[in-house]
Every structure is written in C-alpha cells, then in structure tokens.
Image: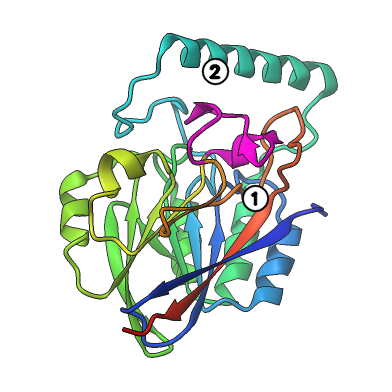
C-alpha cells in the first residue's frame, strides 16, 4: 500500500456561490498505486472530485507543450537533459520499484466515482485514450473534459466546469470564460495561467504537473519539467484563484524531499456582498 500522502485544504470564497461546496483535487496519478489517496478521498467526503491530468500514461512526446508559448532557454533545456539522464541512471542501477500500471488508475477512478461526481481533464501524458479507458469512464459516469465543458448543480449551486487540454483550444477557452455561473477550470499546466488564463473571467483554476518541485527548500519547489529551476507555480494557492497540487505520485527514481504526495481539498464558501 502506498503511504505518507497528506491532505492539504484551501478555502476560496465567491459571490457566485449559493452554498458551501467541497472539491477534491487529484492530479498526476501516473498509473501509480493510490490506496492512501483513496482513503483520504473517502475520509474527506467531497461534493465533487476534479482529476486534473496525467492520470494515465498515454503519450508519445512528454516534452511537447504546444500552448506553453514561453520557449525554453538553453539553461532550462540543459537542466532537463541532465535531470532525465540522472533519473534514468538511478532507475537502471536501483530499479524502479513503483512501476506504472493502468489498473491503478482504473481503481482510483472507480473508487472515486462511488464517492462523488468525477470530472477529469487531460495532461501532457495523455494524448489519446484507448477503448478500455473510454469504457471505464462511461461505466463509472466519469465526465472527460478535453477542451470541453459541462454544467452541474451541486447543493443547489450551478457550476460550469471546463477542461483545458495540453493541446489547448483558445477559441473554446474564450467561449467558456463568458459563462455566467461559477466557472471551474481544470488545467493540468499552471504555466498556462500567465499566457492564456489570467485575464479571463474564470473563478477557480485547478492544476498539477510540477509535482511540487520534487524537492522543496524554504517553501519553494526546486525544479520541474514544465517550470525548470524554481518553478513559479509548484504547489499552493496563487492569485486567490489558481490552486496547484503537488501531485499524487512520484515518478522519479530520486525521492521527493520536503514535498509529500498530496490530495487537495478546496472549501468553496459563499461570499456576501
């Protein structure tokens, strides 16, 4: 059984909310064992579960971020090459004890769907789902949001939920942002906030991708594939509306230091005028 995951809670208020809601944020499962995350989900009793990308390993080119806009500089590229090389070396020497296995992701999603409605967006490890994946989504009433949106009413409060994919559709995003209800956007890549999302009327954005920075020093993430050294968005609440999860798994041969795997719970509360 996986161990040592923690639960982190944030509170966000909005005048668009008619009642309080609890949202669970699950990110970066990467087909690893999630028994402790499932336990924390059951314990937390959320009203809605948001799965923000990289649940599966369905990719051809992990480093291609077509909507990232900001080009990697030489130092960033050199750092990524060195980090991946070191990680590969350790995997070959000590062996990977935590192998990805699709059944782990199926188990998480199946168990999550028994707790609360599940809305799932894609990440850079998910370019195309297979027939079995789609079947599991349908059987468990999991709503897949791939540059698309859905509306749901929970505790009497209407929510407009969207999923912005790695291969993002800016035209769809612009249309989504014009909605009137509370708008919740699942976006695996927090770096898209600055270039695509910040100026749009979106109430809450839930992300992952940077794994908390792998190693955290003085409350800051050290590095990530998407953000390079000291990524701007690694873990936490930013701008009062962007929440970044440290992720539910560790995919590196080196351990996460000062940076436990986490389940994030967001308490949404009405804000009085």
Using residue 179 as the reference point, say whether residue 225 is left or right of it: right
Which quadrant holds residue 42?
bottom right
In the figure, 235 relative to 144: above or below? above
Q: Residue 168's spot in the image, x, y percent?
A: 28, 42
Q: Which residue of the protein is positioned furthest toward the bottom in this rendering?
A: 156
For marks 1 and 2 on the same chain, the one whose residue lies earlier in the sequence: 2
The answer for how far apart the CA atoms under marks 1 and 2 are is 22 Å
Q: Quadrant of the N terminus?
A: bottom right
Give the class, few, some or many, for how many residues have Cα within 10 Å of label 1's Cα (few <14, many ≥20): many
In the figure, 76 relative to 116: above or below? above
Q: Secondary structure at mark 2?
A: helix
Residue placed most toward the observer, 198 or 176: 198
Residue under label 1? 248
**Residue drawn 80% across and 35% down?**
97
**Residue drawn 20% across and 73% down?**
180
Using residue 214 as the reference point, say whether residue 189 is left or right of it: left
In the figure, 101 relative to 222: above or below? below
Magenta residues, start to end: 210-233
Using residue 217 as the reference point, say whether residue 237 is left or right of it: left
Residue placed most toward the observer, 39 or 236: 236
What colour-coding does the image apply?
rainbow
- Contact between marks 1 and 2 (CB within 8 A): the answer is no
**Residue drawn 51% across and 32% down?**
231
Please check the rendered image and state whether residue 215 is part of the magenta-colored stretch, yes or no: yes
| Marker disc for residue 80 | 2
Please check the rendered image and state whether residue 48 is part of the magenta-colored stretch, yes or no: no
Q: Secondary structure at mark 1?
A: loop
**Residue drawn 36% across and 81% down?**
17
Q: Which residue of the protein is positioned furthest toward the front in this rendering?
A: 273
Q: Quadrant of the C terminus?
A: bottom left
Q: Residue 51's spot in the image, x, y percent?
A: 50, 58
Give the class, few, some or many, for how many residues have Cα within 10 Å of label 2's Cα (few <14, many ≥20): many
């Amino acid at each position: 059984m996986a161990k040592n995951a923690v639960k982190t809670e944030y509170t966000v208020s909005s005048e668009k909310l008619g009642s309080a809601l609890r949202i669970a944020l699950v990110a970066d499962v990467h087909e690893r064992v999630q028994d402790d995350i499932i336990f924390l989900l059951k314990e937390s009793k959320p009203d809605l579960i948001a799965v923000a990308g990289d649940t599966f390993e369905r990719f051809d080119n992990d480093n291609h971020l077509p909507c990232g806009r900001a080009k990697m500089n030489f130092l960033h590229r050199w750092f990524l090459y060195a980090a991946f090389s070191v990680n590969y070396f350790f995997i070959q020497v000590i062996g990977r004890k935590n192998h990805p296995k699709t059944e782990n992701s199926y188990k998480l999603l199946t168990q999550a769907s028994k707790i609360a409605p599940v809305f799932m967006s894609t990440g850079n490890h998910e370019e195309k789902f297979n027939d079995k994946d789609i079947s599991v989504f349908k059987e468990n009433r999991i709503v897949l949001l791939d540059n698309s949106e859905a509306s749901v009413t929970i505790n009497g409060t209407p929510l407009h939920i969207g999923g912005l994919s790695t291969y993002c559709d800016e035209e769809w995003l612009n249309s989504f942002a014009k909605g009137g209800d509370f708008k919740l956007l699942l976006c695996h890549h927090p770096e898209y906030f600055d270039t695509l999302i910040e100026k749009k009327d979106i109430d809450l954005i839930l992300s992952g991708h940077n794994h908390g920075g792998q190693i955290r020093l003085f409350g800051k993430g050290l590095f990530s594939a998407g953000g390079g050294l000291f990524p701007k968005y690694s873990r936490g609440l930013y701008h009062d509306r962007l929440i970044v999860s440290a992720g539910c798994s560790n995919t590196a041969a080196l351990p996460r230091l000062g940076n436990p795997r986490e389940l994030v719970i967001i308490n949404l509360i009405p804000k009085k005028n």
